[in-house]
Amino acid sequence: MSPLYKTPARPADTDSCPCGSGKTFGECCAPVLAGKRPAPSAEYMMRARFTAHVVGDQAFLHSSYLETSKKPFIDQPEAHPTKWTRLVIHSEEPSKLPNMAYVDFTAFYEESDTEFAHDEKAEFVKIGEDWIYTRAVRLGPAPFKSPQPKVGRNDPCPCGSGKKYKQCCLLKV
């Protein structure tokens, strides 16, 4: 990242929203950042928080994080602001608990003219009408899930020998 990098100015209401929703900033994240309307979902709050990172809205980030939301905000400029470039939302899933949801996302940023990815599964809780970021449940990409069903011990061996898996290839593992 260049030491001359400065946090970009807030986009115009007619510009594309930095969150990648495909909407304009004025109809997407701007009203949430300004406190004119609450984010209707955890995914929407994640998009608003990403946009706040892009435009350097530290007050919004402070108020939308559970640990700091009840504390007074003291503006302190970032020494080395991160240049966030794009956001990809992979999924939003409700929790088994009411008013809680998880958002799996990748946020991309630039450092020294190289793009890096921040993968996270974030937890959000709904307090009143507001979704609040609580914590990172997982950092890094989602675990790999094999598309193939797991072979059971008593299933036919996938090698085609006609034997049960436990009497064939399981012994070779």
Image: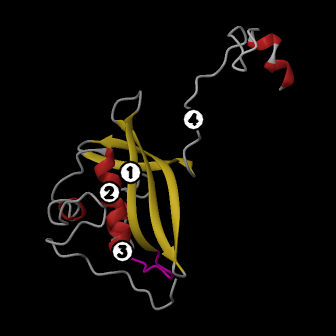
| Residue density around tag 4, few if under 14, some if 14–19, many if 20 or more, within 10 Å | few
Q: Dot 2 corresponds to which residue?
A: 47
Name the mark nearer the viewer: 4 or 3. Answer: 4
| Residue density around tag 2, few if under 14, some if 14–19, many if 20 or more, within 10 Å | many
Residue 72 in the image: state x and y as whole percent.
37, 65
CA separation in Å, label 1 and label 2: 9 Å
Q: In the figure, residue 93 lies in which quadrant?
A: top left
Q: Dot 3 corresponds to which residue?
A: 56
User: Which of the image's four quarters has the C terminus?
Assistant: top right
Residue 143 in the image: state x and y as whole percent.
59, 41
| Mark earlier in primary sequence (1, 3) | 3
Q: Residue furthest bottom?
A: 4
Q: Nearer the viewer, residue 96 or 28?
A: 28
Range of residues picked out in magenta: 75-82
Q: Dot 4 corresponds to which residue?
A: 145
Residue 118 drawn in magenta: no
Name the residue type under label 2.
Arg
Name the residue type under label 1.
Ile
Residue 103 in the image: state x and y as whole percent.
41, 45
| Mark earlier in primary sequence (1, 2) | 2
Name the residue type under label 3.
Gly
Q: Are marks 1 and 4 in contact (CB under 8 Å)?
A: no
Q: Secondary structure at mark 3?
A: loop
Q: Residue at x 63, y 22 (%)?
A: 150
Q: Secondary structure at mark 4?
A: loop
Tell me: 162 left or right of 114.
right
Q: Secondary structure at mark 2?
A: helix
Name the mark nearer the viewer: 4 or 2. Answer: 4
Q: Secondary structure at mark 1?
A: strand
| Mark earlier in primary sequence (2, 3) | 2
The circle on residue 89 is: 1
Name the mark nearer the viewer: 1 or 4. Answer: 4
